Image (spheres, helix red, strand yellow):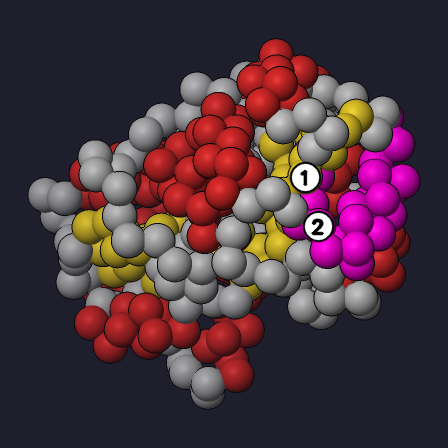
Amino acid sequence: MRNAFIRGLTSLAAADPSVVFLTADLGYKIFDDFATRFPGRFMNAGVAESNMVGVAAGLALGGFRPFIYSIVPFATLRCFEQIRNDVCYNHVPVTIVGVGGGYSYGPNGPTHHALEDIAAMRSLPNMTVICPGDPVETELAVAALGAHREPTYLRLGRAGDPVVHREPPQFQIGKAITMRSGSDCTLISTGGMLPVAMEAAVLLANDISCRVVSMHTVKPLDEVTLSECCRETEALFTLEEHSRIGGLGSAVGEWLSDNNLQFPLHSFGTRDSFMHVSGSQEYLRDDQGLSAPRIAARIAAQLSLAVAC
């Protein structure tokens, strides 16, 4: 997703001279072309993320369109106060780009695990939260942000994220993408869990018809698509590489409650605990029950239970 992001940002900067890019002392190799092509519009803020947010807010108030970039916990949690007071309160078009969602930096340990960021960012007034499902969605999201003059959090994976879309889909901020039709249940995925959701649907295909939806925008939610899923399928399953507290599952649950809908909802996410072991993203996902086989098994069990009841 990182490479897709910088491709999209380079295209956006070529078309819009107000676009500027700030990094917190990382990512130089992949940003070399951007820095060369747009001198004066690439800035290293150093390991000072809070200051970087303040600088970006000032640039936005001066008419620029800043994108700021760091690893997720440092781009969001370390400078939460500045994002709240400088960006969201002033309602300026700063895009916070967090790389390494979920367990993308798994071997680096809990300091680099990104499991609370969606909850934190979606709690802020005026904030849009976008979590692309693959590199194709990432590049399209950056293009869409050119016309989106709102505070935005763009949550990315890292490198080597699987490409799911064979052809570029229609992409609109706040509008989910239906990846696969189905009538028994809907798997609503956000971020890098999209390939896992697709795999789980294939594993279940002989017995359970699963619709798969890429809910790339967590705030605002696509309420139209959610309503269709509730009318046309029997249960909702949300999938996210994030804490089950405050993320996509919570957002969908809040929507159901606000609309007085008593509809089956089951959330896949991480447990409310720190990981005290180090391992790859795949290892940590499986430990948390977020691998395709474990998700498929739990969906089958839940739907069998519902039928039995």
Q: Pick the residue in front: 127 or 77.
A: 127
Q: Which residue is mark 2?
A: 64
Queried whether the magenta region covers residue 54, the answer comes back as yes
Which numbered disc, 1 or 2, marks the residue that appears first in the sequence? 1
Q: Which mark is residue 20?
A: 1
Left or right, residue 243 beside residue 2: right
- Under mark 1, the amino acid is Val
Query: Dot 2, how many residues are within 10 Å of its Cα: few (below 14), some (14-19), or many (20+)?
Result: many
- Under mark 2, the amino acid is Phe
Element on which disc 1 rests = strand
Asked if the residue at tag 2 contacts the one at tag 1, i.e. Cβ–Cβ closer than 8 Å, the answer is yes
**Residue shown at the point (86%, 48%) measured from the top left:** 54
Element on which disc 2 rests = loop
Q: Is residue 117 visible?
A: no
- Which of the 4 quarters of the picture holds residue 173? bottom left
Residue at the left extreme of this rendering? 206
Residue 246 picture location, percent across and down: 63, 58
Residue 189 picture location, percent across and down: 40, 49
Give how far apart the Cα atoms at labels 1 and 2 are. Answer: 7 Å
Q: Pick the residue in front: 76 or 169.
A: 169
Q: Is residue 205 above or below residue 210?
A: above
Range of magenta residues:
47-70
Query: Dot 1, how many residues are within 10 Å of its Cα: few (below 14), some (14-19), or many (20+)?
Result: many
Q: Is residue 260 above or below residue 83?
A: below
Left or right, residue 89 beside residue 301: right
